[in-house]
Image (spheres, rainbow, N blue to C red):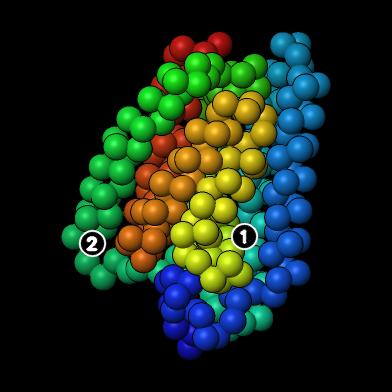
Amino acid sequence: MATPVTTPSNQANSGLIAPAWHTAAVLVVLFGFSAFSVWRASQTTASNQGPRARAVSYVVIMVFEWLTVAFIGWGVRRRGIRIADLIAGSWPKWTAILRDLGIAMLFLVLSNVVLGIMRFALKATPTRAMRDIIPQTPAEIGLWIVLALTAGFCEEVIFRGYLQKQLGLMTKSAAAGLVLQGIVFGACHGYQGAKFMITIAVYGCLFGWLAYQRRSLRPGMIAHFLQDGVTGLVLRRFLR
């Protein structure tokens, strides 16, 4: 049975967690999808961004993220590693779940203070694409929650579980892996514009730090789901 993957230093003698070409393919796919989102946003108008278009967007994003995780799972299995190993950690008792929930809540409060200061300093305002993706109808809200769950699981596996470890091993530096995955994370949100991409890159680094400190993606997955889910429901009251 494969041992849990925790930090790049623990993998130093066993090589990469997936072939280098596999990581290159993951990056090409991620950047390609981000470029597509930018192009799609440029083609979107008030007349073609209705409930049906939003629902389709949610489904497309979910399918893309699950397929990316499946491709990552296939790649790491070539080295005897499972997705569960990338996630790491465990919940042997309900108190462990409460502990990670508490850590996630504290992380959200502190990180959003940092991001709020950054957005204020950068004078970052929501783009039209960000406004258009916010759910409006009850059906969209339900689908949005599923999307937030998908993002919480898949994006943490992709960026903190896979890329952070793999890039750390490639550069022989855990810190470099953490920063690089954060930059990639920000770059993958092209539709939100340059200023928000910067703040999201920092957010990705903070999530990377949380994963590194906890040796587990579980608190980050909870925080990611709450951030995306609650933000969407709150912003629908203000962004139309």
Q: How many marks?
A: 2
The answer to whether 25 appears left or right of 115 in the picture is: right
Residue identifier under label 1:
69
Give me the disc on residue 224.
Answer: none
Query: Of 124 and 63, which appears nearest the observer?
Result: 124
Q: Are marks 1 and 2 in contact (CB under 8 Å)?
A: no
Going by the numbered disc 1, the residue's amino acid type is Val
Q: Quadrant of residue 56?
A: top right
Task: Judge whether 175 appears above or below 80 on screen.
Answer: above
Q: Farthest residue toward the bottom?
A: 1
How far across and down, in percent of the image, does residue 45 sit? Answer: 75, 14
The image position of residue 100, as x and y in percent, is: 28, 55
Residue 28 screen position, x and y as percent:
76, 53
Residue 191: name its quadrant.
top right
The 10 Å Cα crowd at callout 2, few under 14, some 14 to 19, many 20 or more, is few
Looking at the image, which is closer to me, 150 or 191?
Answer: 191
Disc 1 from disc 2: Cα separation: 25 Å
Residue marked by disc 2: 96
Q: Quadrant of the C terminus?
A: top right
Q: Residue at x 26, y 70 (%)?
A: 92
In x, y percent, where is residue 75? Answer: 67, 72
Dot 2: element: helix
Callout 2, which amino acid? Ala
